[in-house]
Image: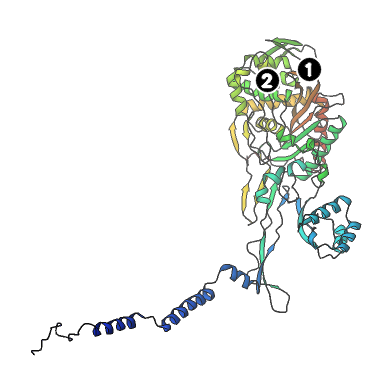
Amino acid sequence: MQRVELSTGGRGTFVPAGRGQEKGSEALERHYSISPWLLFVILYFVVGVALVERHCYPDSRIVQQAQHQYWRRVPVKATRGVIQDTRGIAMVISEPLPSFALDPSLLTQEDMLTLQRVLSGDAMTRVMDAREAGSHFLWLQRKMPPEAAERLAGLKMRAIRRIDEQDRRYTNRQLMAHVLGFCNIDNRGLAGIEQAWDSTLYNPPGYRIVVRNPGKQPAPAAENPMGRPHVTPVVTLTLDSRIQYIVEKHLYKAAKADGAKWASAICMDPWTGAILAMASWPSYDPQNRSSLKPEALSNSAVSRGYEPGSTFKPIYMGIALERGWVRTNEVFSCPARLKVADGYITEAYPVAMGNIDTAHLLVKSSNVGMAQIGIRAEKTKTYESLRAWGFGQETDIELPAVAKGIVPYPEQWRGVVPANIAIGQGLAVTPLQLITAEAAIVNGGRLMSPYIVKEASNSLGEVVYKGTPRVMREVLTPETAAWLRQAMRAVVVEGTGKRAATKVTKLAGKTGTAQVPEKGKYSRNRYVASFIGFWPYEDPQYLMLIVIGEPSGGRYYGGELAAPPFKDIVEEMAELDYYAPAAPSGKESA
């Protein structure tokens, strides 16, 4: 038989069916089987990657935990900033005091018996309530005096923990209380400079790196002692604590003697707008929180609106002279009473003054004469001028709770209102607004922006604010301002302000007496007495306003109630060498 060969492409031989297929299956099975060594290699690779990751790229929590075995970043409590007067005398500082907290869950029965002997009934009740509630933290007492703290620390209980804190200390107690303000138990400002400058005075805590050596006490790491610069913030005021003391002493004395409901005084440099003293009555002790009564907390110098009365007349006269509504050589007929629209304007003393010139409207404080100018004035232009002088809007000063006052819109000037505004009634001003406006008369016509902060630096030692003189606008010509100063000098020499006159210097000023509005009418029993003046007359260094609100002692005229303490303050400042005729006036710096 002939043998047949099949081609396989040049290679291989023909394999009969059956047995050849069986051998092919076995070859395929051997080709796709997984070797145990391969699994071992893969497992080894996974474990290796995990080890490299754990050792070379560990979790941050693991790193922190490991590092704490050798070093620790310990917080360092920072001191809240200092507030000082213009001469660098510290008025507010921080003092370290201990506080004590309790973990009620750690108290034993013996501890409870001990605490009953040293804690008050109310405190013990709080402890028992916290223990029953399963609490782990309870303040026993915060910021304790050192003697009391020693007694509590002497108990040596595991449940009691001492925590060092900072407490604010007001070095002169009530002095500047309304300006400085106060803080809460956690040293955050709640009033005055403490509140307005809280973000600057607050000093964020830093930290110190501590190395843990085996078997030794922890030691600070020299290469990084603090996490940031540790600088105590400082806010420097324009106030002089010596002037402040004199002003407060005589203001409080007058307010107490006449049973005043409130009182305020401001002393200012009229050339720069810097506040030299600011006081309010009633006062409080920021060191003693039990004295923080609501009626005493308000800083009346910036937050109380009142009708200024005749102290407003020089300002209104200045507006009228600039607008051409009155001439300096004009003569007015002044009866005791004048009918105006739906009301009457009467003199303070019901006596006719006869024919008097423009200057003597201020010297004798004639309501009837000023009312005649108010009737002439154009309502809209008067309103615009009052706004330009800063009335009816918030005064730009570095304090909180600054009131805007009230100037009625021209549409509301109906009937007797224009005449009332001319005599300082029918509108509300703050003492700060009034003295700022009067400063323009003293300095030749420039309305200065008042300021009470001289400089402020933060916890990094950076100066973040500098108070500087700033002219807001020109409101008078120098000639008009000079004429008004002469008239105000005559007020003290021959007019209603004689009781402010003193031998230590020549001064000029204006008295004010205003009725208090009550239920749509003016009260006959409630008054506000005031006096504003500047000295020395030839080259003014100081401008001061004294306001005594709602006295109950029977006297209420500004000339008899506010002028005498004004005189006392001027004389005591002279005794302490504050009045220096040769000193520069500050005109160039304005």
Residue 276 lies in what quarter of the image? top right
Say which of 437 and 406 sits in front: 406
Q: Is residue 384 visible?
A: yes
Tell me what residue is drawn at x 72 percent, y 42 percent.
191
Q: Is residue 444 left or right of residue 56?
A: right
Which quadrant does the C terminus fall into?
A: top right
Residue type at tag 1: Ala
Which residue corresponds to mark 1? 348
Tag in front: 1 or 2:
2
Pick the quarter of the image with the N terminus: bottom left
Residue at the image point whose x is 67% and y is 59% from the top: 205
Colour mapping used in the image? rainbow
Indicate whether 518 appears above or below 261.
Answer: above
- Circle 1/circle 2 CB separation < 8 Å: no
Choose top left, top right, bottom left or bottom right for residue 362: top right
Neighbourhood count class around disc 2 (C-alpha, 10 Å): few under 14, some 14–19, many 20 upward: many
Q: Secondary structure at mark 1?
A: loop
- The amino acid type of the residue labelled 2 equals Ile
- Among the 4 quarters of the image, the one containing residue 544: top right
- How many residues crowd mark 1 within 10 Å: few (<14), some (14–19), many (20+)? some
- Image vertical order of residue 556 relative to residue 218, above or below: above
Left or right of residue 199, residue 573 in this image? right
> Which residue is under mark 2?
421
Question: Considering only vertical position in the picture, is 213 above or below 482?
Answer: below
